[in-house]
Amino acid sequence: MELKNPICRLFNIKYPIIQAGMVWCSGWKLASAVSNSGGLGIIGAGSMYPAILLEHIRQCKQATDKPFGVNIPLLYPNVQEIIDIVIQEEVKIVFTSAGNPVTWTAILKEKGITVVHVVANTKFALKAQEAGVDAIVAEGFEAGGHNGREETTTMCLIPIIKEAVHIPVIAAGGIASGKSMLAAFALGADAVQIGSAFAIAEESSAHPAFKNKIILSAEGDTRLAMKKLVPVRLLKNEFADAIAQAEAEGADQTQLKEMLGKARAKLGMFEGDLANGELEIGQVSAMLKEIKPAKRILEEIWEEFLKAKNELAAQNFDI
Amino acid sequence: MELKNPICRLFNIKYPIIQAGMVWCSGWKLASAVSNSGGLGIIGAGSMYPAILLEHIRQCKQATDKPFGVNIPLLYPNVQEIIDIVIQEEVKIVFTSAGNPVTWTAILKEKGITVVHVVANTKFALKAQEAGVDAIVAEGFEAGGHNGREETTTMCLIPIIKEAVHIPVIAAGGIASGKSMLAAFALGADAVQIGSAFAIAEESSAHPAFKNKIILSAEGDTRLAMKKLVPVRLLKNEFADAIAQAEAEGADQTQLKEMLGKARAKLGMFEGDLANGELEIGQVSAMLKEIKPAKRILEEIWEEFLKAKNELAAQNFDI
C-alpha cells in the first residue's frame, strides 16, 4: 500500500510523528522504541562522544529493523568525525541542526542519506532547501532546548515557512498531544517532531529526578534563557533563576559563559542535579503528567489526533 | 435557526470571529464594519477619554444594528467612569482586560451585560470564571500589545485553559488567517479573537504610515519589550531598539518608565511617528500584506477556514 503522507513516504514510517533528537534523553533505547512503534526514532548525537555515538547506532540497529535517524548539531567541533561515523555505519536518515546546512548536506546526500535540517526562521529554511535537504523541521519559540533568536511561535512560523518552501515541513515546538498535532497539520505541517513528551518516556535516558520534575511542572515554569549566547528554553530551577537574575541586571556574554561553565545540561538532565543543572524542556512540560513507554505515548497521541480530526470535521459551521 | 457555535450563540453573531479591542485602532468605524459583516466588532476604550468613548459608542449604534462590544482595560484610573458610560449607553457586551475581573464582573452582569475577560494564564482564567464571566479570551505570547508574563504561546495555552474551565474559550495571538483559525479550533477553542489583521483594515483608525510599516514588516520584526513593567509586543523601530538596548544593559523600572514617557503608543500608532512611537502589533504582522476593508478581511479568513477544514478532513491517514 502506498503511504499518503509525504513524510511517511520519505522515511517509510507508519505515523507522521518524529521523536526529536535530544541531548541526554534520546539514546538507542528511546530511538528504537519509537521506531519499533511506527514513528521515527532519532539518536541525539549532541551529547555523545564519537565512540559513544558509534555504540548507540550499533545498539539501535540491533534493537530495531525499522528506520531510525541521528541528529547532528553542526556547530560542534567534532562534526567531521560524527559525520564519518554515520556514513560508515550506513545510517539512512540524518537530522542536522544548530548550524549551516550548506557544507554537510551535499556530503550526506552523496552517500544516499535522507537529510532534514532544523530551522527557526524562513531564511534558514530557504538556505536548507537550496542546500538540497529532503525536508525541514520548523521549530517554534515554545520548544525546549536551543531555540531561534526571532522568538517566532509555532502558530506563526509554520504557515510562513510552509508558504516559502516546496519541500515537506515538520512542525516542532508546543506539540505533545493529538490536538496540538492536529493544530500543526491545520497550519500546513506535513508531520510533527515531538521532544518533551518523549523526554519523559520510560526509555529516555534522562535522569528519573528530571523526569519527575517535568511531570510536576506547571504553566509558566520554563523560560528562554541565555539570549546573548544561544537562546535555550529551560525549566526554572536555582540555576535558571540565577541566570534570569544576572540577565535582568545586564550580564554580558563573558559573565553568562562563566555562570554556565561546562556540562551543565549533563549535570541536570543526566545526573539529576535539579538545583544546579541545566534542564532543557519545552513549554508543554506543563501538560505532561505521566512517565510511560514510548509506544504508549505515540499511540495515545495518534489516537487523540484521529479523534480530534473527526470531531473538528463534524463541527457544524452552517450559517 | 439555532446557531451551533457557543460563541455565535452567546453574542448572536454569524461568524465565531471577534475583532480585538485595540488602542488607537478600533473605534466605531472598525467595530461597526466588523459587526455589520457578521463578526463581533469591539471598540477599544483603552485609548479613549470617557467623552470620546461615549461618542464612539453612540456612533457605533448609528452605524450598526448588530451586536458590538467595548473592551475596558481594568487597570486604568478612570475605570468607574468608563463602566458607568457602557451601562448608561446600554452596551450589551463588555470585554475586560489587564486587571482583576472580580470587582467589575458582578456589576456588569447585574445590568444584563455579557462579560468576557482576557487572560494569558490558567490562574486568571479560573479567577474570571469564578467571577462569573460568560467566556474567556486566552491570549498567547505571539499577540500584539500587552502580554502575559509567563510567555506561554497560543499553541500551549489554549489546550491547558480549555481543560481547566467549563465556559467557552476564545483563542487569541497568532491568528490572522483561516488556517491559524482552524489550528485554534483544533486546540479546542470555540472562537478566535483577531487583532493585527484588523489593525490594518481600511476602517482602522491607525495612522496610514503605521499600517504601511506593518505590511512591509517581516518575520522577526516584533519583540516583547518592557518585561520589567508590563510586557508589550512592539514592531521594531528606533524606539523599540533603544528599549532593547537598555534592557540588555539591565535598565530598571525607573529607567524604562523614563524612556517610555507618556503617550508613546498614540505618537506611533495614531500620529504616525514611526521612529519614536510605540507600535503595538503581533507576530502575524509578517503575514499581513494588504490594507483591505474589514468585511473582506473577515470573509477571506472565513472562506480559508472552511476550505482548510475540508482539506484537513480529507487528508488520508489510513495506515
Image (tube, coloured by chain):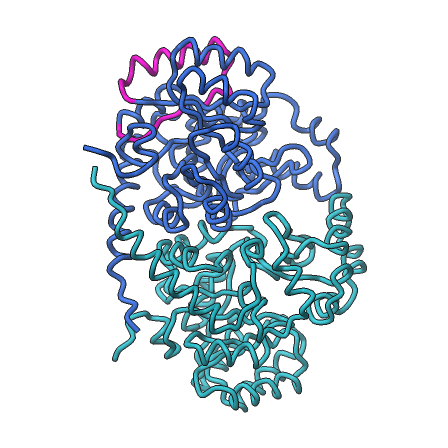
Chain colours: A cyan, B blue
Q: Quadrant of the C terminus of chain B?
A: bottom left
Residue B50, magenta (yes or no): yes
Closer-to-camera residue (B180/A88): B180
| Residue at screen point 64% across, 58% down | A232
Instruction: Determine the image quadrant of residue B197.
Output: top left
* Residue B166 on image: x %, y %: 44, 40
- In the image, B227: left or right of B315? right
Q: Can you say whether A209 is above or below B88 in the image?
A: below
- In the image, A293: left or right of A15? right
Q: Can you say whether B156 is above or below A261 in the image?
A: above
Residue A56, magenta (yes or no): no
| Residue at screen point 59% across, 85% down | A56
* Residue A167 on image: x %, y %: 37, 67
Closer-to-camera residue (B45/A308): A308
Is residue B52 among the parts visible in the rendering? yes
Closer-to-camera residue (A294/B17): A294
- In the image, A211: left or right of A162? right
Is residue A99 among the parts visible in the rendering? no
Closer-to-camera residue (B59/A109): B59
Residues shaded magenta = B37-66
Q: Quadrant of the N terminus of chain B?
A: top left
* Residue A301 on image: x %, y %: 43, 64
Which residue, as the protein is rendered here, is positioned at the far left?
B1
Query: How many labels sit on residues?
Result: 0
